[in-house]
Structure formats: C-alpha cells, structure tokens
Amino acid sequence: MQLYNTLSAEERAIMIDDAGKQRLTLSFYAYAKIQDPKKFRDDLFLAWNALDALGRIYVATEGINAQMSIPEENLEAFRATLEVYDFMKGIRLNEAVEHDDHSFLKLTIKVRDKIVADGLNDETFDVTDIGVHLKAKEFNDILDDPNTIVVDFRNHYESEVGHFKNAITPDVETFRESLPIINEQLQNHKEDKNLVMYCTGGIRCEKASAYFKHQGFKNVFQLEGGIINYAKQIEAEGIESKFIGKNFVFDNRLGERITDDIISQCHQCGKPCDNHTNCENDGCHLLFIQCDECKAAMENCCSTECLDIIHMPLVDQVRLRTGKQVGNKVFRKGKSDSLKFKHSGELPNTSLATAEKPLDIRQKIKVKKVLLGKAEHYYVKAQVGLFTIENHELNTGDKILISGPTTGNQELILEKMIVNEAQATTAKIGDRVTFEVPFRIRLSDKLYKIVN
C-alpha cells in the first residue's frame, strides 16, 4: 500500500509535460470533527494518488485544508472521492484564476493539530459558529456602508501586493498574530460596526468570524470563498472589483492577477512591481518582491552575499548551511535588512504612480552574465532542451551558460534554435525555446547569456 511519493518533483514535471493533459489548480476547506485524522489522511492519499492528484493538504481533528492540482479529465472522479464524506458533500472547489500545470509537483497530506493555527486554547470556542457569508456583489455593497470595518486576515507579504480598498492590513507574519491585534483595536465597536473580513480562499476568515462572534461582536461578515471566488464572480457578473492588485497564492505561481494595479515596489530598487521571488540561495530562500531587471542582475538573489554564495561550488554551499535553519526560520518572511524598499504596514490605496528614486542595484556588482530563464524539459533521445525566456533577449550566436546543482556550469555557443515551434534567430521574453544540448539538463536549471 503506497502512502508516499515515489517520484521527485523533477520527474513528476517531466511526466506532466509528456502527458500533455490540462490540469486544474483548485483549493477547498471544511471545518468538521474528524475522529481519526491519520486514517482519514491515508484513505485520501490512496484515492487521490490513483487520480494523479497533487497538492499540499493539511488534516486535523477540526477539518481539512487543501490546495491541489488535478487533471481536468479527473475532476468528477475527484469530486466523488469527497462525496464519500458527509461533511464534504457539495463542497465548493475554488478554481484558480490562472491554471498552471506545474503549480504542485507532489502529493503531500500532513496531519496537524489544527488546519489553521490560531494560538487559541479555549474549549468553549465553536469554530462552526461563523459569521454571515457574502457573495461578491453583497461584499461590494457592504464595503460602501460607512458603518463597515473591513479586515484583511492574510499576512503582510500577501496584502502588500493586493488588497481591498480601505482594508485594515495587519503587519503580521501569521494568522494567529492578527486575532488579538484586531480584537484589541476594535473593542469599542462590538455592536455599532459591521465587521467584515476576507482572506485568500475563505478558510482563515471563516475561523476569524467564529472567533469574533465568540468575543461578542454582533455584526460579523465574511467573503464567501475568499478572493479567489470573488475574482471569478466579478468577472462572470461584470461588476466592479474593489480588490486592487494581485492575489498571493501558496503554490509555484505565487500570485494571480486580479486588476492591473501595481501597489507595491521592488524591494531592491524601488520600481513599481508585485512579482515575488524566493532567493536562489538554498540557505536563504527569502520571499521578497523583485523586478525583472533586479532578477537578471541579482540572479534571483536577495543580496550580494547570497549572490556570492550561489557561485560557490555546491560542496561549499552545503557546508555553509549545514546545521543552520533556513528560509522562514532565519528571516522574517519577506523582511531582511538587505531589502531597501520593504514597507510592510504602509500600503497605499492606489497604484504607485511614482516610487522612491530607483536604486540601480546592478551598479553594485560586476555583471559577467545575465539570467535568461530556466529549463522546462529535456528530450533525452533528441538531446534537446526546452527553456522559457523570462528576461532579456536570446540570439543565435550568443554564448550561453546552463547551470544547476547537478548539471554544474556548462557553456556552449547557440548555433540554431526553435522559438515557439518555428525556427528563428531571436527569442524574446515569454518565448518558449528549444535547441540542441549535448548533455543532460534538469528541471529548473538556469539559462544565462555570457555578456563579457
């Protein structure tokens, strides 16, 4: 009985590409009393693994929280696996605004104490006694009421790139931090205000609405299905979006565009930007906002220190991070002294018409190569690599470098290439490029152009 993944993320990505099937990215949650979360977890893994379902799922005695990717053709069969359980009959599946075949590359189901950590130890708290659900138009209407207070129950790095107009956006890193902060701020408005809340898919504000009702707030409302469902409803019904910017999502995409507004800055140079990057240094992985220019100059790194590290031999990189905690445990997520233009908690209500004077971070380093993109696939028999161009322009005759932990650093001259399935001499940002590569490359190997 297989209850674990047998393929690596790289192998799974290749299988997905070879299958050529449309996949859906979706999320759902349900609060319920689950007597044996471990058995529940095992049963789900067996059922979903058989359907080629991938994702990150948490189960606990209080319910289930799932973000997933499934083949579109298996959608109804997947729904059937949910209908087995009474508390998931007719459950709403929030489909992503933008689908990505590689949004998840493993099926991970973990048993947790709670599906949403809240820091509460109150046995009288009933998580199912929730506030009133509001659909998109109802939510818009109540936001126009001067008697309304709207609260974003996401974290600072989420609300920084997009939020509802005039929302309170707590400068917090976790959901549990926001509950006491908002409770204290609104103590004098338990009866005279509409307390309206939202989050990404509904699961956090559902628990928050129950918490504030438990605290004695009389008029508690929540956005049904969160921002994901709101975006679909406003498009389907042709109504105004009161959400501005991008919705942060917890998969490989890191965001979905809701409106064209850009309300945040590149954390390195200050230019208007709302694209998140995870630092390329495996001993860091800091989540921060980085524009295309800084991404190319800094090679996806958050600092010159991390830039120096990624150019070290792999054995030295491993030695440097041995015994150290990485990522979120080292840095506050999205916060570091290396980020000169990070302003959590100081969010504008409109687009950044002007920003602070941009800093040319490229002047800090001597650039010998520029990042073009990353490897998407390798056709072994043909010895051909597929790459997506994310920065700059690629031309035949360019000297290129393919680099990765296993591949090492391999240089070659680009003699010819296929761009978007047609032979061409130039590839631009957004193009998919294939060309002969006489050595094995791996998923997400980096493609560079040597410039001096």
Image (spheres, rainbow, N blue to C red):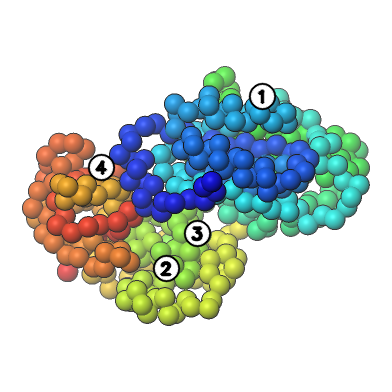
Q: Position of residue 449 (x, y in %)?
A: 21, 60
Q: Which residue does the numbered mark 1 point to in the structure image?
A: 90
The dot on residue 431 is: 4
Q: Is residue 374 left or right of residue 283?
A: left
Picture coordinates of residue 350 (x, y %)?
Answer: 56, 43
* CA gap, disc 4 and disc 1: 41 Å
- For badge 2, the amino acid type reads Asn
Q: CA distance from mark 1 to mark 2?
A: 43 Å
For marks 3 and 1, give the one nearer the viewer: 1
Q: Residue at x 79, y 30 (%)?
A: 132
Q: Disc 1 on helix, strand or loop?
A: loop
Residue position marked by numbered label 2 in the rendering: 281
Based on the displayed image, in which of its 4 quarters is residue 86 positioned? Answer: top right
Q: Quadrant of residue 372?
A: bottom left
Q: Earlier in the sequence, mark 3 or mark 1?
A: 1
The residue mark sitting in front, 4 or 2, is 2
Provide the secondary structure element on which disc 4 rests: loop
- Give the residue at the far top of this rendering: 237
Asked if 193 appears above or below 117 in the picture, the reply is above
Give the residue type that dot 1 points to. Gly
